[in-house]
Image (spheres, helix red, strand yellow):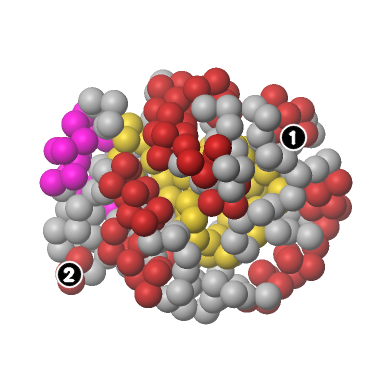
Amino acid sequence: MNPSGTWRYPRVLAHRGGGTLAPENTMAGLVEGMRRGFRAIEYDVMLARDGVPVVMHDPFLGRTVAGSGNVFDYDALELAAMDAGSWFARRYDGEPVPLFVEFAQFCKAHGVWQNMEIKPAPGYEIETGGTVARIAASMFADEIAAGRWEAVPLLSSFSELALASAREVAPLVPRALLMSELPPDWERRAHAVEAVAIHVNHRHLTPALAQAVRAAGFGLFCYTVDEPARARELLGWGVEAFCTDRIDLISPDFS
């Protein structure tokens, strides 16, 4: 059975690694977050054409990665040779697209807890969810066997198909359902994928909804909270954790 109930992970996560201080979803961003004291990160994973997962948010090139076309038009090593940093600042010219396994292993080796967001391209939901879950289960097999759930990554996704696939492949790796705002059937949908937590856009949360999520036994996480006053308000509502881009304003030990 999966662990369930209360949130057992860090309270503040660095969004995509370095927030506003470094290019997102890169090793440089991860290192910047670590330099600021963060030991918890949220980042995105999708599949390249050859089925190898990479750390990227968009299913297409052009915003953070120089180039054109879709992620699944390229093999992983081709993506890893692309520039994912110069869009942010010239000093990051040549910063590569990380391979998921190397990125996750680096996090684990440095004690950085991971919220791995499964970000499938359309039509690749089942394959992406299963692949990410299989790798996470293998990488953290010892922690799972020992019941050290606080060290095991949390798999989150907006895709219920991806989460269902993750559950099928690696039922012991905890899952969280991402929803921008909570629809009337949020509880049924979260139970359907056996989620331990619900992740929601803080802009759509209310005190009543926060109370309902907690009363239903789910952990409650918000994205992306960049103002300290808003973070304190949400924590007062019962929100247990959040990610932030403003790692310069909100510290890892924020309360």
Dot 2 amino acid type: Arg
Percent position of residue 180, x then y: 62, 44
Residue labelled with disc 1: 186
- The stretch of residues the image draws in magenta is 62-81
The answer to whether residue 103 shows anywhere in this view is yes
* Classed neighbour count for the residue bearing mark 1: other residues with Cα under 10 Å, few (<14), some (14–19), many (≥20): some
Q: Which mark is residue 90?
A: 2
Q: Which one is in front, 23 or 108?
A: 108
Main SS, magenta residues: loop
* Classed neighbour count for the residue bearing mark 2: other residues with Cα under 10 Å, few (<14), some (14–19), many (≥20): few
Q: Which one is in front, 122 or 131?
A: 131
Q: CA distance from mark 2 to mark 1?
A: 43 Å
Q: Residue at x 54, y 76 (%)?
A: 251
Dot 1 amino acid type: Trp
Percent position of residue 178, x then y: 60, 41
Residue 70 in which image quadrant: top left
The answer to whether residue 132 shows anywhere in this view is no
Q: Secondary structure at mark 1?
A: helix
Total count of labels: 2
Q: Dots 2 and 1: beta carbons under 8 Å?
A: no
Above or below, 219 against 158 in this view is: below
Above or below, 181 against 75 in this view is: below
